[in-house]
Image (cartoon, rainbow, N blue to C red):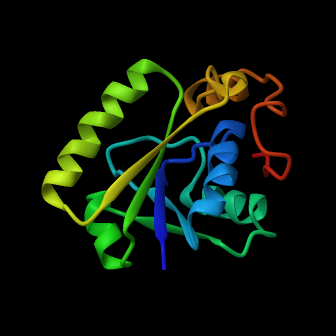
C-alpha cells in the first residue's frame, strides 16, 4: 500500500493545498493530512478547528485521513508505516527550503521518499500566511480557501 503524509500547519488550508492533494490522490492508496503541532508557534486556528476544517473539506474522499503529530515528521511517518512525504512547491524559494529538508530526511530515514508537486500558476501566490492576514483584517478569503472551509 502506498501511503503518503502531507504534513503542514494548515492554518488555514488553502486552495493551493487542496489542488496539490487532489492531484496526488491517483498516486497513493492513502494520503494522511498530518497537522504538525509546534508548541513554540502561535496558531490562528485551534488544532480542533483545523482538524474539523480538513475533515469537512475532504469528507467525500475515502483515501484521505486527518491526523496530528508532534516531533519529527520522519518519526511520525515511521510510526504509521508511511513511505512517502508529499510537499507542494509554489516558488523557487520553496524548492530550496523543501529540498534541504528532504535531503536531511533522506539521510535520517532512507526508506522515506519525498514527492514534490509544483503548484498551478494561479495558486503560486496563495499562502496560509497571506490568507491569515486577509482574515485578520476583515477581508474576504473565499477565493483562497476550499469551498467547504469552515470560517471562524
Q: Residue at x 81, y 70 (%)?
A: 60
| Residue shown at 74% from the left, 63% from the top | 58
Give the side of residue 151 with respect to residue 31, left or right. right
The answer to whether residue 152 is left or right of residue 93 is: right
Q: Is residue 148 above or below residue 74?
A: above
Please provide percent x and percent y for residue 78.
Answer: 29, 73
Left or right? Give the position of 52 relative to 94: right
- Residue 70 versus residue 136: which sits nearer the camera? 70
Determine the image quadrant of residue 36.
bottom left
Count all numbered tags in the image, as a single digit: 0
- Residue 55, position in %: x, y? 70, 66
Q: Residue at x 39, y 71 (%)?
A: 82
Q: Does residue 24 sit above or below 132 in this rendering?
A: below
The residue most toward the left is 107
Q: Position of residue 103 (x, y in %)?
A: 21, 43
Q: Quadrant of residue 142?
A: top right
Q: Residue at x 29, y 62 (%)?
A: 112
Depicted 55 relative to depicted 98: above or below: below
Q: Nearer the viewer, residue 86 or 143?
A: 86
Amino acid at each position: 500500500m502506498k501511503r503518503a503524509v502531507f504534513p503542514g500547519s494548515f492554518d488555514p488550508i488553502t486552495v493551493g493545498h487542496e489542488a496539490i492533494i487532489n492531484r496526488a490522490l491517483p498516486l497513493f492508496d492513502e494520503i494522511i493530512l498530518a497537522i504538525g503541532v509546534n508548541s513554540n508557534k502561535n496558531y490562528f486556528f485551534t488544532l480542533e478547528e483545523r482538524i474539523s476544517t480538513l475533515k469537512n473539506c475532504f469528507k467525500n474522499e475515502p483515501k484521505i485521513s486527518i491526523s496530528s503529530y508532534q516531533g519529527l515528521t520522519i518519526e511520525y511517518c515511521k510510526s504509521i508505516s508511511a513511505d512517502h512525504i508529499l510537499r507542494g512547491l509554489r516558488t523557487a524559494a520553496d524548492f530550496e527550503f523543501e529540498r534541504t529538508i528532504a535531503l536531511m530526511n533522506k539521510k535520517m530515514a532512507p526508506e522515506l521518499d519525498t514527492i514534490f508537486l509544483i503548484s498551478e500558476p494561479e495558486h503560486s501566490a496563495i499562502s496560509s500566511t497571506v490568507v491569515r492576514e486577509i482574515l485578520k483584517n476583515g477581508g474576504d478569503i473565499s477565493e483562497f480557501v476550499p469551498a467547504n472551509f469552515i470560517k471562524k
